[in-house]
């Protein structure tokens, strides 16, 4: 039997319904993991506001699509102590500082000459203890990492070498909630995940996360950032694009198998159960451009072209 080592995962935020882009990423994460003999895990990223019922619906839909996972899904909200333990180890190492900036402070700093877009300019990095003391009376601080580099290069299965900024990013928000960039690194390590397949919008976060993994003494995973699904206006897929969820398409008479076939066709993969798709899955053959979701894909003519290629 093939030795299974490592795991891949899909980590949805239960803030709403999964749209075609999320479903496509989930299928890809499953195919990447299973085609490399890895386990596949689900993690519900519910540190931000979760919408009632969203988690159950997401899990049901992923299962309806044919995904399976090796352990019960975990919820981030149930693992707060492990984020706090990592934050404590970073505090101990003198790697964090308190930041009192409001969103507005950061937006204003971003307009300064030489400011790099999306990069924290270090406003609170060198406050003195007495300045901090005063600022603490105004608002609770967020905790930021004192980054020792400005950029890092990671390897991505689809993008090759990718270099992106590593700034003093937030690890604990000022409401006390662990920040996404910290939680994702801590969880991937704790769950034995060594393969991260997710939407291309997160590629620019990977250098920060890989850097943090190094500081926490855990290995950075292998990355594959997959193309996003876009509406025909070129913006990220959303409700305005019409029926883009399993539920909405189902209400229009499209069964889950048909939606799966459309998603697979968008990647030049054959329709059918995922176990069969696994036989022909090759990351090198995946399209590298975003998937433009045209409503005509779901019309009877669009559907005929899917079934014809079956
Ligand atoms: N929870 C994130 C999202 O739904 C994904 C995070 C990740 O895959 O690292 O966009």
Image (cartoon, grey):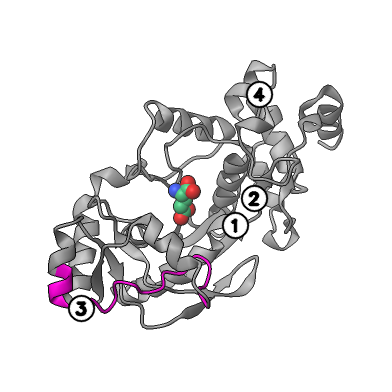
Q: Residue at x 33, y 63 (%)?
A: 170
Q: Residue at x 81, y 30 (%)?
A: 296
| 219 left or right of 301 in image | left
Give the crowd class for mark 4: few <14, some 14-19, many >=20 residues within 10 Å: some
N-terminal-most mark, 2 or 1: 1
Q: Name the main secondary structure of what is drawn in magenta.
A: loop
Asked whether the residues under the numbered discs 2 and 1 touch, taking CB atoms below 8 Å apart as contact, a structural biologist would say yes
Looking at the rendering, the stretch of residues picked out in magenta corresponds to: 114-132
User: Which sits in the foreground, 19 or 43?
Assistant: 19
Q: Dot 1: what SS?
A: helix
**Residue located beneath label 2 in the image:** 228
Give the crowd class for mark 3: few <14, some 14-19, many >=20 residues within 10 Å: few
**Residue located beneath label 4 in the image:** 249
N-terminal-most mark, 4 or 1: 1
| Label 1 beta carbon within 8 A of ligand 1 | no
Q: Residue at x 49, y 57 (%)?
A: 38
């Amino acid at each position: 039997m093939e030795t299974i080592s490592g795991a891949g995962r899909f980590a949805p935020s239960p803030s709403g319904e999964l749209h075609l882009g999320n479903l496509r990423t989930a299928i890809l994460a499953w195919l990447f993991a299973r085609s490399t003999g890895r386990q596949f895990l689900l993690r519900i990223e519910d540190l931000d506001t979760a919408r009632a019922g969203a988690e159950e619906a997401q899990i049901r839909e992923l299962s309806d699509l044919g995904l399976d996972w090796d352990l019960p899904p975990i919820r981030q909200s149930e693992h707060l102590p492990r984020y706090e333990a990592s934050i404590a180890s970073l505090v101990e190492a003198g790697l964090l500082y308190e930041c009192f900036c409001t969103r507005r402070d950061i937006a204003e700093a971003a307009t300064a000459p030489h400011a790099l877009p999306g990069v924290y300019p270090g406003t609170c990095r060198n406050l003195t203890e007495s300045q901090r003391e005063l600022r603490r009376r105004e608002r609770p601080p967020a905790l930021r990492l004192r980054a020792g580099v400005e950029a890092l290069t990671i390897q991505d299965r689809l993008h090759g070498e990718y270099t992106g900024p590593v700034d003093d990013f937030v690890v604990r928000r000022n409401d006390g909630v662990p920040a996404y960039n910290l939680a994702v690194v801590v969880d991937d390590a704790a769950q034995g995940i060594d393969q991260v397949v997710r939407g291309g919008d997160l590629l620019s976060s990977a250098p920060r996360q890989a850097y943090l993994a190094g500081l926490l003494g855990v290995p950075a995973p292998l990355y594959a950032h997959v193309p996003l699904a876009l509406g025909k206006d070129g913006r990220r897929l959303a409700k305005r694009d019409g029926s883009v969820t399993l539920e909405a398409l189902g209400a229009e008479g499209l069964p889950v198998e048909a939606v799966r076939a459309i998603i697979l066709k968008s990647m030049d993969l054959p329709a059918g159960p995922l176990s069969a798709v696994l036989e022909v899955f090759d990351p090198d053959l995946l399209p590298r451009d975003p998937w433009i979701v045209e409503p005509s894909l779901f019309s009877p003519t669009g559907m005929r072209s899917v079934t014809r290629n079956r």
